[in-house]
Image (tube, rainbow, N blue to C red):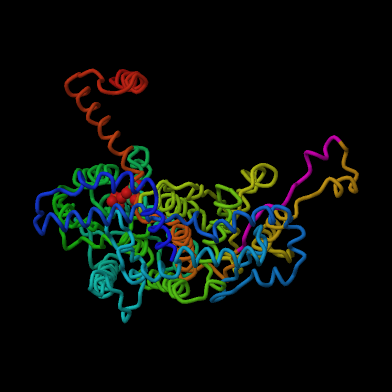
């Protein structure tokens, strides 16, 4: 109906008649068109009409209704909202022992029902189903988005372009299992016959952050650390030679396996780091050692071979896996299996898969990623809070925020809709975070008394590494969790001048000690943090971010915004080459860059 109304409006509009009808004699050629020409013309006309008809979610009635609803919410304080126990009860839910409490969001049950209407207007259900069905929802790259297939059980069928991809996924997983078993049990050894006990994974962005997050979280999990048995896994991402030095320091090429991880196998930083470590190996052990000490993960197996890595030692994935969604492909599974053994990684995949099923089938009111996604849209687009803090109360999750930063900001940091129409609202959010309680002694001041930043508090019931001190009833983990429970209330309730007066606080200090409160947060409580739970947490965030993008009507699965900087860096690289090799002076850059570049060349010449 809406589409029909819009097209009627377009055809009835004076602009349409002025542009199209009056000029039809010049638009419609008099000569006869061939079948091919006519079909092209029809396609162009349809595309133009579709572009005119492209609707933005901000034009929908539920969006406008939510906009109007903001003033109702602004009249309420969380301090009061929290007294309504029925509201609080309705804003709590549990799935598979994961407990979500979003009662400290600046929202009422009315807000939630309006958000569900927004989800309907954005066709959220259909979009989720299209993703799982392998439709090409990444339209600018004409690709499916099927990271959920990477963790599907063997008997599942997930079609991509008419082919079930699950057997391909499992073929690679089986190959990883076999290879990592060989490395771990010593049936595959290095060029000098020694066991390969250390792994350096080279990769950047999505080929680094996800695996690093999972590795950091598993490191202190008793089951995983036992099966690591003294092995080392390091990650080389930055092209900075300092990162190279940090990675190879203390490692012996004889006992080191290098895994080059790159979806495209063209990323400048990764390829230079790969050449650097290839030289490190071959200068120590001879060029023939490379085949024993270097393997690859990529979608581009031709370039892997060209680089000099035996294609039999390459682990494939597919263009329907986005870089930042690739941790469940060989990108993460290979290095993590080498370090912890395949069974631990399989458990991680099962965790992610359990959330996939929940996301696909749970009704929206009980669907954790959907609720989190809708609340983020509410906070960003309606309450106009542009950032989000990710605050896990466990050191094991110290790399969660950096990973989610990429998944979220590269996915949803877009300025146009999926149809290419400039957005009249801001999409995406600024993600940052630190584990508690460290963050409390860093940026929480701003969160409590400065800007309003919606927070995700993540707590774990059973610590990975509990410590019980003699004579202390409240153990270390309890101490940590006391903060996890206290902070959301401090943010929500604040502290009023009246309370301060009743405490006899000096009047000149009252403004400084006042906490306005009414600062939204949500809390996720996980029973433990093992491989399975880490997989669940990953999938919750991945799907939450997809939900946000689906509502905003953007393409969360491309990343054109990273290209411009890359191409400018390649111009600079060419200039550095020409200046160093032939002494050419800096040319073709603006005044400021020329000045700075010349200074760099001169000062680094000796
Ligand atoms: O930063 C841009 C980007 O393309 C990311 O999307 C990707 O994760 C990263 O570079 C690494 O790419 P590749 O895996 O192809 O080396």
Image coordinates of residue 390 in percent, x first then y, are 55, 54
Give the magenta part as a residue range. 508-523
Quadrant containing the N terminus in the rendered view: bottom left
Q: Residue 66 appears in which quarter of the rendering?
A: bottom right
Image coordinates of residue 485 in percent, x first then y, are 69, 61
Residue at coordinates 50% horizontally, 65% vertically from top-left?
119
Query: Which is more toward the observer, 41 or 74?
Result: 41
Query: Which is more toward the observer, 4 or 119?
Result: 4
Residue 258 seen in the current view: no
Asked whether residue 539 is drawn in magenta, I would say: no
Image coordinates of residue 398 in percent, x first then y, are 51, 54
Query: Which is more toward the observer, 243 or 382?
Result: 382
Pick out the residue farthest to the bottom. 155
Q: Is 14 on the left-hand or right-hand side of 162?
A: right
Q: Residue 376 appears in which quarter of the rendering?
A: bottom right
Residue 398 seen in the current view: yes
Q: Is 322 on the left-hand or right-hand side of 102?
A: left
Residue at coordinates 31% horizontally, 19% vertically from top-left?
598
Residue at coordinates 47% horizontally, 57% vertically from top-left?
57
Image coordinates of residue 55 in percent, x first then y, are 42, 56
Q: Is 448 on the left-hand or right-hand side of 531?
A: right
Query: Does residue 441 sit above or below 58 in this rendering?
Result: above
Residue at coordinates 25% horizontally, 23% vertically from top-left?
588
Q: Residue 213 appears in which quarter of the rendering?
A: bottom left
Query: Which is more toward the observer, 248 or 370?
Result: 370
The tally of labels here is: 0
Quadrant containing the C terminus in the rendered view: top left
């Amino acid at each position: 109906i809406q589409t029909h109304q819009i097209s009627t409006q377009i055809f009835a509009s004076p602009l349409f008649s002025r542009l199209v009808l009056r000029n039809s004699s010049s638009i419609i050629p008099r000569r006869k068109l061939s079948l091919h020409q006519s079909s092209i013309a029809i396609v162009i006309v349809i595309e133009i009409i579709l572009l005119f008809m492209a609707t933005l979610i901000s034009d929908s009635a539920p969006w406008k209704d939510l906009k109007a609803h903001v003033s109702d919410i602004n009249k309420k304080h969380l301090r009061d909202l929290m007294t309504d126990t029925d509201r609080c009860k309705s804003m709590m839910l549990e799935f598979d022992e994961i407990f979500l409490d979003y009662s400290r969001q600046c929202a009422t049950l009315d807000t939630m029902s309006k958000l569900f209407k927004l989800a309907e207007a954005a066709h959220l259900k259909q979009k989720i189903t299209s993703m799982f069905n392998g439709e090409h929802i990444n339209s600018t790259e004409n690709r499916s988005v099927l990271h959920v297939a990477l963790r599907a059980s063997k008997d599942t069928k997930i079609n991509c372009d008419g082919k079930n991809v699950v057997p391909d996924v499992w073929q690679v997983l089986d190959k990883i299992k076999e290879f990592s078993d060989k490395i771990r049990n010593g049936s595959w050894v290095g060029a000098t016959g020694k066991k390969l006990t250390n792994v350096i994974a080279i990769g950047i962005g999505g080929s680094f952050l996800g695996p690093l997050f999972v590795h950091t979280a598993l490191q202190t999990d008793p089951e995983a650390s036992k099966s690591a048995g003294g092995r080392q896994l390091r990650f080389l991402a930055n092209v900075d030679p300092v990162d190279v030095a940090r990675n190879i320091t203390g490692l012996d090429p004889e006992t080191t396996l290098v895994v080059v991880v790159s979806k495209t196998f063209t990323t400048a930083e990764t390829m230079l780091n790969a050449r650097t470590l290839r030289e490190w190996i071959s200068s120590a052990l001879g060029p023939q050692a490379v085949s024993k000490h270097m393997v690859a993960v990529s979608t581009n197996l031709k370039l892997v071979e060209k680089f000099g890595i035996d294609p039999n030692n390459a682990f494939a994935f597919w263009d329907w896996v986005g870089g930042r969604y690739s941790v469940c492909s060989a990108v993460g599974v290979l290095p993590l299996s080498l370090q912890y053994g395949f069974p631990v990684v399989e458990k991680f995949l099962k965790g992610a898969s359990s959330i996939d099923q929940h996301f696909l089938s749970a009704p929206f009111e009980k669907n954790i990623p959907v609720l989190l996604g809708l609340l983020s849209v509410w906070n960003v687009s309606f309450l106009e809070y542009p950032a989000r803090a990710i605050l896990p109360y466990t050191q094991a999750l110290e790399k969660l925020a950096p990973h989610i930063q990429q998944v979220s900001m590269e996915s949803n940091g877009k300025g146009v809709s999926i149809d290419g129409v400039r957005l009249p609202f801001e999409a995406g959010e600024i993600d940052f975070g630190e584990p508690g309680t460290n963050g409390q002694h860093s940026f929480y001041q701003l969160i409590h008394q400065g800007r309003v930043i919606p927070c995700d508090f993540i707590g774990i019931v059973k610590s990975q590494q509990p410590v019980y001190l003699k004579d202390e009833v409240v153990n270390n983990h309890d101490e940590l969790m006391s903060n996890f429970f206290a902070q959301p209330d401090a943010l929500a309730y604040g502290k009023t001048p009246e309370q301060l007066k009743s405490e006899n606080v000096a009047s000149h200090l009252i403004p400084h000690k006042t906490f306005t409160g009414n600062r939204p947060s949500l809390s996720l409580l996980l029973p433990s943090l093992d491989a399975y739970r880490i997989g669940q947490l990953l999938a919750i965030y991945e799907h939450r971010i997809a939900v946000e993008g689906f509502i905003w009507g953007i393409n969360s699965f491309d990343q054109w915004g990273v290209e411009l900087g890359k191409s400018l860096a390649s111009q600079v690289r060419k200039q550095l080459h020409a200046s160093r090799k032939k002494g050419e002076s800096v040319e073709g850059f603006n005044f400021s860059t020329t000045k700075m570049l010349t200074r760099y060349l001169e000062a680094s010449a000796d």
